[in-house]
Image (cartoon, rainbow, N blue to C red):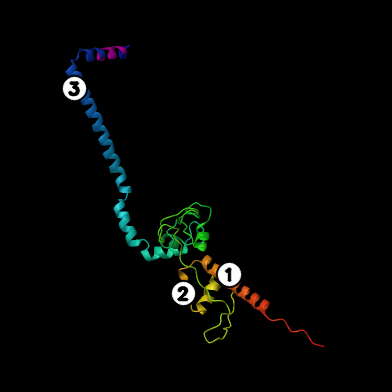
């Protein structure tokens, strides 16, 4: 009952105010609400400030204690995020492909297969892309050109070369014995190395087969 009388008194009091008085009350109410909100924000910031770190400070700490550029490069050379057989460093700096997608151009061929074929892993099959060749698919690094396992030397002698097993590290070591530098081989992926190895062995086998088929037959014996 008392609450009803109180509300009636307030309503009557409000109706008795002039338009200007009502406007003043409204403005004061809005200002009070804004002041309360600002106070809440200031109190909140004061509470959480000791537990937060400025982004600029985090950046400086990362520069001091984080990995150096050389360490980042070495990590990229050891990492193959998308598992396509090409290191993140080669994808970012050599082939300009995505280290997070096995097939950067989404044409169905993974990046390592396109690199092995000498096509651009960023250019879909059947399309012409602007690249280093000027309007055609930009090829990857040149294939490794291997000597035939028993290629005659300039003096006509045939060097005795022991063919290694088909394993990237073994083939790389074998190539260094043939005069390839470690820096030169580092510019080629294991896929390219093995592809060149297969081509060299196939060429040697084909040459051996051709030589045996061209050898003259023994003359028939004369009774």
Q: Which residues are magenta?
A: 4-10
Give the distance between the C-alpha atoms of the residues marked 3 and 2, in whole angstroms: 85 Å
Q: Which residue is mark 1?
A: 198
Instruction: Classify mark 2: helix, strand or loop.
Output: helix
Q: Residues within 10 Å of mark 2 (few under 14, many from 20)?
A: few
Quarter in which the C terminus is drawn: bottom right
| Quarter of the rendering occupied by the N terminus | top left
According to the picture, the residue beneath numbered tag 2 turns out to be 182
Q: Which element carries disc 3, helix, strand or loop?
A: helix
**Mark closer to the observer (3, 2):** 2
Residue appearing at x 22%, y 29% in the figure: 31
Comes first in the chain, label 3 or label 2: 3
Alpha carbons under labels 2 and 1: distance apart = 20 Å
Circle 1 residues within 10 Å: few <14, some 14–19, many ≥20: some
Q: Within 10 angstroms of label 3, few (less than 14), some, or many (20 or more) residues?
A: few
Query: Earlier along the polypeptide chain: callout 2 or callout 1?
Result: 2
Question: Mark 2 against mark 1, which lies toward the viewer?
Answer: 1
**Horizontal and vertical percent for residue 37?**
27, 33
Q: Which element is circle 1 on?
A: helix
Q: Which residue is mark 3?
A: 24
Q: Is residue 55 left or right of residue 105?
A: left
């Amino acid at each position: 009952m008392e609450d009803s009388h109180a509300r009636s008194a307030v309503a009557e009091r409000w109706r008795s105010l002039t338009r200007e008085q009502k406007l003043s009350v409204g403005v004061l109410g809005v200002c009070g609400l804004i002041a309360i909100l600002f106070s809440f924000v200031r109190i909140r910031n004061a509470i959480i400030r000791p537990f937060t770190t400025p982004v600029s400070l985090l950046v400086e700490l990362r520069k001091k204690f984080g990995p150096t550029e050389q360490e980042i490069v070495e990590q990229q050379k050891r990492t193959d995020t998308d598992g396509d057989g090409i290191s993140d460093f080669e994808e970012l700096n050599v082939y300009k492909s995505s280290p997070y997608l096995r097939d950067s151009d989404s044409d169905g061929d993974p990046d390592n297969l396109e690199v092995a074929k000498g096509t651009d892993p960023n250019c879909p099959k059947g399309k012409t892309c602007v690249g280093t060749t000027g309007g055609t698919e930009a090829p990857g690094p040149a294939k490794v050109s291997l000597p035939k396992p028993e290629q005659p030397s300039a003096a006509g002698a045939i060097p005795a070369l022991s063919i290694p097993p088909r394993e990237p590290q073994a083939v790389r070591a074998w190539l260094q014995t043939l005069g390839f530098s470690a820096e030169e081989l580092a510019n080629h992926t294991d896929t390219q190395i093995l592809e060149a190895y297969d081509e060299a062995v196939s060429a040697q086998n084909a040459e051996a087969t051709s030589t045996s088929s061209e050898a003259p037959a023994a003359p028939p014996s004369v009774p």
